[in-house]
Image (tube, helix red, strand yellow):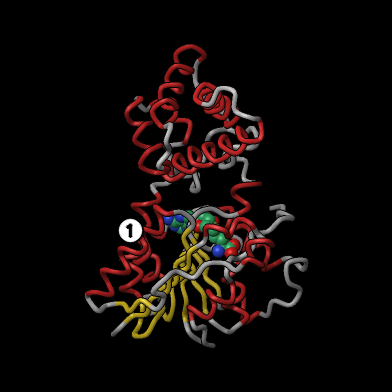
């Protein structure tokens, strides 16, 4: 595998590591391994890690990074031995954790959403900027792609996806335009075609708008439409609920649950599940308000703008 030159920068790294309270010899689950940003740090601190990712490229990438002299020349045998990698979904967290003996752990981390690799290098159409097949599957074993949704859903179903998963103001007009394009021009298979459909709708909704303002509105709308498709293709909200509920049960006493979310829909789910656990005295919320990135971190990595970090600790 060719290692990408641009890595995913782990967000709020010190805060996440402090949140997990890493201790030598203890066990942690990184439920969203990605490029392994947090996992490699936990290993350096002497923790044992079960790294899970639904995207097989992530597993391949981390394996290759452990082997390559360019990754980190001196990965010690002990550090490598402390890492277990699984291509799987955190919706199956209990089953995976038990299989590897990680059923009583000191910390579990969820860094939600997608990695820089997926967005910029996977070629699976996560970004509205290029021209790639409308795929958006994180796990390529899965059958349904974004193209299947765009080409087979009814107008009502598309409206629901754009509204429910992105709160998009122009959901109705965009859903109607997708149906029109399908009828007049055939299937929408590529990101560029979908982008053109959305742009055409916005030109009609905002006639005479200045180019700079148009670009701002267009980019926001495209980001939301693409996000809603990604959430739908990967069943992200249901998987998140399943993953969080199981995570709580896998923590040992005083174990930490650390969750980074990137949009309000995700954050609402995290907040609700943590609040219920806190009320029932199973978890104690340690972040009354979510931790967000500093101005300096946002300047260095604008993608962290929307990051919200919530931490909770297991009672008993
Ligand atoms: C923001 S990235 C994680 C980046 C990582 N923390 C790092 O520092 O490189 C999110 C990762 O979670 C993975 N992911 C998303 N949903 C998942 C799920 N249900 N189960 C397992 N992994 C998932 C994605 O494939 C992606 O690699």
> Which residue of the protein is positioned furthest toward the left in this rendering?
280
Judge whether 136 appears above or below 313 on screen. Answer: above
Q: Secondary structure at mark 1?
A: helix
Outermost residue toward the bottom in this view: 24
Q: Quarter of the image containing the C terminus? A: bottom left
Does any portion of residue 95 appear in the rendered image? no
Percent position of residue 115, x then y = 58, 55
The spot of residue 146 in percent (x, y) is: 47, 35
Dot 1 crowding, Cα within 10 Å, few <14, some 14–19, many 20+: some
Does 240 sit left or right of 84 as displayed? left
Residue shown at 34% from the left, 74% from the top: 250
Q: Is residue 43 above or below residue 37?
A: below
Picture layout, residue 232 above or below residue 22 = above
* Horizontal side of residue 4 vs 144, given as left or right: right
Q: How many dots with numbers?
A: 1
Asked if residue 242 is positioned above or below residue 277 in the image, the reply reads: above
Which of the pair 230/249 is nearer the observer? Answer: 230
User: Which residue is painted at 71% across and 54% down in the image?
Assistant: 4
Residue at x-position 59% and y-position 53%: 57
Of residue 309 and residue 245, the one placed in the foreground of this image is: 309
Query: Does residue 90 appear to the left or right of 215 in the view shown?
Result: left
Q: Nearer the viewer, residue 253 or 285?
A: 285
- Give the image quarter of residue 259: bottom left
Examine the image and state in which quarter residue 149 appears: top left
Residue at the outermost top position: 184
Residue beneath disc 1: 241
- Residue 111: in sight, yes or no? yes
């Amino acid at each position: 595998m060719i290692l990408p030159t641009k890595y995913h920068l782990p967000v709020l790294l010190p805060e996440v590591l402090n949140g997990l309270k890493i201790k030598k010899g203890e066990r942690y689950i990184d439920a969203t391994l990605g490029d392994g940003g947090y996992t490699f740090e936990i290993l350096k601190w002497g923790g044992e890690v079960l790294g899970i990712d639904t995207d097989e490229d992530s597993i391949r990438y981390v394996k290759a990074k452990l082997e390559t002299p360019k990754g980190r020349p001196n990965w010690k045998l002990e550090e490598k031995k402390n890492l277990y990698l699984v291509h799987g979904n955190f919706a199956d967290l209990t089953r995976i954790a038990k299989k590897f003996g990680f059923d009583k752990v000191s910390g579990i981390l969820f860094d939600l959403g997608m990695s820089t690799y997926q967005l910029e290098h996977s070629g699976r159409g996560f970004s509205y900027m290029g021209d790639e097949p409308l795929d958006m599957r994180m796990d390529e074993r899965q059958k349904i792609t974004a193209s299947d949704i765009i080409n087979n859903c009814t107008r009502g179903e598309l409206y629901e996806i754009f509204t429910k998963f992105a709160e998009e103001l122009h959901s109705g007009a965009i859903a109607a335009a997708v149906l029109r394009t399908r009828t007049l021009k055939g299937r929408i298979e590529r990101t560029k075609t979908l982008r053109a459909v959305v742009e055409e709708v916005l030109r009609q909704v905002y006639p005479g708008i200045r180019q700079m303002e148009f670009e701002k509105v267009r980019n926001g709308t495209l980001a939301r439409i693409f996000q809603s498709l990604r959430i739908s293709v990967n069943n992200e909200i249901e998987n998140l609920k399943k993953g969080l509920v199981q995570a709580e049960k896998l923590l040992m006493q005083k174990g930490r649950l650390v969750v980074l979310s990137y949009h309000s829909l995700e954050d609402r789910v995290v907040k609700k599940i943590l609040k219920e656990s806190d009320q029932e005295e199973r978890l104690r919320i340690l972040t009354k308000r979510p931790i967000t990135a500093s101005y300096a971190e946002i300047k260095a990595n604008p993608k962290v703008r929307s990051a919200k970090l919530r931490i909770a600790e297991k009672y008993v």
